[in-house]
Image (cartoon, rainbow, N blue to C red):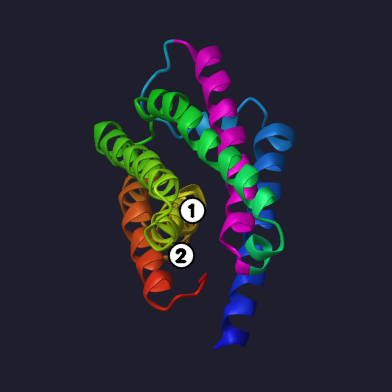
Amino acid sequence: MNLVKKVTNILIIIISIMWVLHTLSKNFVIDPLFQRFLSNKDQLLMNQSLWIVMIRIHILLAVAALMTGPLGLIKRIRLKSLQFHRWNGRIYVLSIILNYIPGFYVSFFATGGWLSTIGFLILNTLWILTTIKGYLFIKKKQIIPHKHWMIRSFFLSFANMTIYVIVKIIHHGINLSSYVTSYTIAVWLCWILNLCLAEIFIRRKMFV
C-alpha cells in the first residue's frame, strides 16, 4: 500500500507539472489572444480585452494552486518542514480566494451559454468553499478534517484538465457533432467526477 501511495504522489506531481506547462504554453505562447477558444463561443463578448485580462489572471492563479497543491498534500514534504507547509498552504489558499472574482466574471461568458455558466458558478463556489473550510479547520487545529477538505479543494483545481479530457472523449472520440454541447457536459461533469475521485482518495487515505 505504501508503494501505491508513493506512486500516486509522484503521478500527482507529474500530472500537475505537465498540465501547468500545457496551460502556460497554450495560453501565453501558442494562442495568447485566445482566438481558437473564442471561435467556439456562441455569444459575443462586449469587452474582449477585459475578458482576456480576466482569463489570464484566472489561469495564472489556477497555475499557482496546481503548483502549491501537491506540495501541501504529500506527507513527506509536510513532515520535512512544517514552516514550508504553512507558507505553501497560505499561497494555495490565497490563489484560490483571489481567483473567485476573475473566475466568477469569465463564467458569464462561458461556451455553452447559461447551462455552462451555472456549472462554472457551482464549480467556483465549491472550490472556494472547500478551500476555506480546510483553512478554518487547521486554524482550529483539527488536522484530519483539514486534510480531507484540502484534498477536495485540490481535486477541484484539476477541473479545467477534466473538461479538456471529457471534451476530447465526447467531441473527438465519440464524435458528438456539437463542440458546445460537449463542452457544456464537461463543465458539469468536471466538478462531479473530481469530487467523487477526491472521496475515493480520502477513504483510501492516499495522502495521510
Does residue 206 lie above or below 64 as drawn? below
Residue 121, how many percent across, how many down?
31, 35
Q: Residue furthest top?
A: 47
Residue ID at (63%, 45%): 88
Q: Pointer 2: what residue?
A: 173
Magenta segment's dominant SS is helix
The answer to which image quadrant residue 139 occupies is top left
Q: Nearer the viewer, mark 2 or mark 1?
A: 1
Q: Nearer the viewer, residue 20 or 198?
A: 198
Q: Is 48 within the magenta? A: yes
Q: Amino acid at mark 2?
A: Gly
Taking the image as drawn, is residue 65 in sight? yes
Q: 86 left or right of 81?
A: left
The earlier-in-sequence mark between 2 and 1 is 1
Q: Residues within 10 Å of mark 1 (few under 14, many from 20)?
A: many
Q: Nearer the viewer, residue 161 or 183?
A: 161
Taking the image as drawn, is residue 63 in sight? no
Q: Residue furthest front?
A: 141
Residue ID at (58%, 26%): 57
Q: Nearer the viewer, residue 65 or 150?
A: 150
Residue ID at (55%, 35%): 95
The region drawn magenta spans 47-75
Q: Pointer 1: what residue?
A: 154
Image quarter where the N terminus lies is bottom right
Q: CA distance from mark 2 to mark 1?
A: 28 Å
